[in-house]
Image (spheres, grey):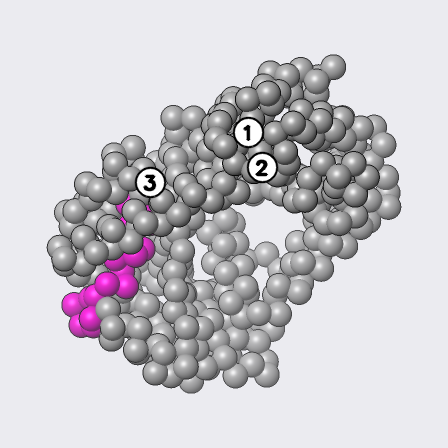
């Protein structure tokens, strides 16, 4: 498998990876235009724009966009994250040219028809309502806002309904002009692809774009705090977060391994102690999320209102204990899980293309898989214990609680117990 990178003269980056033997390909356009690139009055517009891209262009109706891909048996979709918006398609290898033609059309030529804006506004408001009715979904938005208060990085990707109700065609066009600039665009493809063909098509579709000077993104500053929403649910939903390394920091692999040992699977500490031994919950897990300048290590669980205190106390005690007695066996198991998850995922061309775009956005190059494996292997037991100790001693945490949580410990109780 060969990764090839090309830069158009205007700054658009084109990266491909040929996967021998595959008859299909995944191709997409990734734009550095996510939730954290919005101003306060724009919150939710990146996601709104992602929806509107499929509602018609200067040359295709919404139905023609869908038919163009589905007529050849393909699949097209998009998503918005805090740092990127992705438009991607999965097609047979011979249809990659068609896929890129459609993708470039929806990215560069959307027609913001007022009627379609109203239709999609209603769809997004329904999506926001659905999120609010899904406790183990909305709690992560509240946790993010608590961790990064009054900052773009802390705002919800969907935006508040009050903001979504106001967006118009001029607002959408302004965001495109601000953020959909050549230096923010990455065309990535993996599978049965020909690099030179993709480059030629990218030049035809994107080569005319003029560079745009970008506004600096406001840095993320972890603050922590508490969000507590009392509601008569069957379960209390608990999410706890600590500051974690940014993705350009090699210690991000230490954080990933620490999270894996704490709550990355059925053999993890929290799963064994909280669920298997004490029956405090059905679901409990830990994970890391990294951004360009910050990150979070998050622990989530659902439990009864009466047992929130016991669950949080056990979680804190396990974090403290990890700084003293994390074992080599746990480290080896977490390493194996991390490597296997990455390598198994890369058997999919869609995941390969995603990896190409993500790493190129982070490093402006695509580190080899071997380089990533070496960094995972280089994590030591001392480093994992030290990270556990640093989080425990930091004195800062973000805590989000939803459901029957009136008697739950406060974030000050949690950090106090950690530091004790």
Q: CA distance from mark 1 to mark 3?
A: 26 Å
| Discs 2, 1 touching: Cβ within 8 Å | yes
Determine which of the numbered discs, if any, sits on residue 235 in the image: 2
Secondary structure of the residue carrying numbered label 1: loop
Where residue 152 appears, x then y in whole percent? 38, 34
Judging depth in this view, the residue of 196 and 43 nearest the camera is 43
Secondary structure of the residue carrying numbered label 2: loop
Disc on the earlier residue, 1 or 3: 3
Judging depth in this view, the residue of 118 and 327 nearest the camera is 118
Quadrant housing residue 273: top right
Where residue 405 appears, x then y in whole percent? 56, 26
Q: What residue is drawn where x is 30% and y is 78%?
A: 68
Q: What residue is drawn where x is 67% and y is 24%?
A: 309
Residue 253 vertical placement versus 7 (above, below): above
Disc on the earlier residue, 3 or 2: 3
Residue 281 in the figure: left or right of residue 70: right
Residue occupied by mark 1: 404
Residue occupied by mark 3: 159
Q: What residue is drawn where x is 80% and y is 28%?
A: 321
- Reply yes or no: does residue 350 show up in magenta: no
């Amino acid at each position: 498998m060969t990764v090839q990178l090309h830069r158009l003269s205007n700054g658009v980056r084109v990266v491909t990876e040929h996967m021998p033997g595959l008859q299909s390909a995944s191709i997409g356009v990734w734009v550095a235009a996510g939730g954290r690139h919005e101003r306060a009055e724009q919150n939710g517009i990146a996601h709104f724009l992602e929806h509107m891209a499929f509602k018609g262009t200067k040359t295709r109706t919404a139905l023609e966009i869908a038919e163009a891909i589905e007529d050849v048996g393909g699949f097209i979709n998009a998503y918005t994250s805090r740092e990127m918006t992705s438009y991607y398609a999965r097609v047979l290898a011979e249809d990659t040219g068609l896929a890129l033609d459609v993708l470039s059309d929806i990215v560069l030529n959307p027609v913001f028809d007022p009627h379609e804006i109203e239709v999609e506004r209603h769809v997004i408001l329904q999506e926001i309502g659905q999120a609010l009715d899904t406790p183990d979904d909305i709690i992560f938005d509240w946790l993010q806002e608590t961790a990064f208060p009054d900052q773009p990085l802390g705002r919800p990707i969907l935006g508040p309904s009050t903001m979504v109700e106001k967006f118009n065609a001029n607002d959408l066009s302004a965001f495109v002009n601000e953020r959909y600039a050549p230096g923010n665009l990455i065309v990535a493809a993996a599978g049965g692809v020909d690099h030179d063909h993709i480059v030629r098509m990218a030049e035809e579709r994107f080569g005319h774009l003029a560079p745009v000077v970008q506004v600096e993104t406001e840095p993320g500053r972890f603050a922590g705090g508490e969000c507590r929403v009392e509601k008569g649910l069957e379960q209390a939903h608990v999410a706890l977060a600590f500051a974690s390394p940014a993705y350009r920091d090699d210690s991000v692999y230490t954080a990933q391994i620490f999270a894996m040992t704490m709550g990355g699977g059925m053999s993890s500490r929290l799963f064994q102690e909280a669920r298997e031994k004490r029956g405090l919950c059905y679901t409990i897990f830990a994970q890391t999320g990294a951004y360009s300048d910050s990150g979070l290590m998050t622990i989530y669980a659902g439990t009864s209102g009466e047992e929130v205190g016991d669950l949080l106390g056990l979680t804190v005690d396990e974090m403290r204990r990890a700084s003293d007695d994390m074992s080599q066996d746990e480290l080896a198991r977490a390493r194996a899980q991390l490597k296997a998850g990455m390598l198994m995922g890369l058997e999919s061309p869609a995941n390969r293309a995603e990896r190409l775009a993500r790493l190129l956005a982070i490093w402006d190059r695509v580190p080899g898989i071997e380089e990533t494996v070496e960094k995972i292997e280089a994590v030591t037991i001392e480093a994992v214990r030290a990270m556990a100790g640093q989080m425990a001693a930091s004195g800062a945490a973000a805590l989000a609680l939803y459901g029957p949580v009136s008697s739950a410990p406060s974030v000050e109780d949690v950090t106090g117990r950690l530091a004790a």
